[in-house]
Amino acid sequence: MKSSIHKKILLLIFTFMIIYGSFSVVIAKETPVDNLEVVVKKQLIGRKIKPYEFIFVLEGTSELTKDVYEEIENDKYGLAKFSEIEFEDVGKYSYKIFELNTGDRKTRYDNKVYELEIDIKKLDGKLKRVVKLNGNTVDENKVVELKFISRTGKSIIRGNSKYK
């Protein structure tokens, strides 16, 4: 019902504009693509994780994302969330996400680097996105979850030296 009322109102406005000579064309902007959330789940083996103990980095690696650099820290549950990624234009948005080694000698940091690529395409007049993580297509949802695992509690031996 609401849709038919809107159509009638638009028809009246259009008719008025033609009769009185003030005609203009309004081009509607394309429907935007939903923002994407990137969430980190940190697991620490050896003891309970502390808030703000680990730092994670999201860094842009393509022309569209070259100015993006964000650092976040975990909460008391090991979770951390980057700012939502917004998409304004067609193109490839590429990022790398990794854990920052802050130098704790009792912690073996996860050296995994995730490569996140979001390809925004125009198909059938609408914007569509394809999300890939390390080259594999991710289910079409609004959240990408990444997991990092570290070990702690034991001294790490390097060469003939033992660090505590």
Image (cartoon, rainbow, N blue to C red):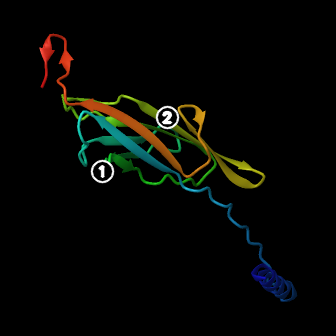
The kind of secondary structure element at disc 2 is strand
Would you say the residues marked 2 and 1 are in contact, meaning their CB atoms lie under 8 Å apart? no
Tell me the residue at 43%/47% (across/down): 39
Residue 123 vertical placement versus 32 (above, below): above
Q: Is residue 1 left or right of residue 83?
A: right
Residue 65 vertical placement versus 113 (above, below): below
**Chain-order first, disc 2 or disc 1:** 1
| Mark 1 nearby-residue class (10 Å; few <14, some 14–19, many ≥20) | some
- Residue hosting label 1: 75
**Residue 49 locus on image (x, y percent):** 26, 43
Q: Is residue 162 visible?
A: yes
- Image quadrant where residue 22 sits: bottom right
Q: Is residue 79 left or right of residue 103?
A: right
Q: Amino acid at mark 2?
A: Glu
Mark closer to the observer (2, 1): 1
- Residue hosting label 2: 115
Q: Nearer the viewer, residue 110 or 116?
A: 110
Counting labels gives: 2
Q: Is residue 32 left or right of residue 49?
A: right
Tell me how far mark 2 sits from mark 1, CA to CA.
23 Å
**Residue 62 locus on image (x, y percent):** 51, 38
Residue extending furthest top? Answer: 160
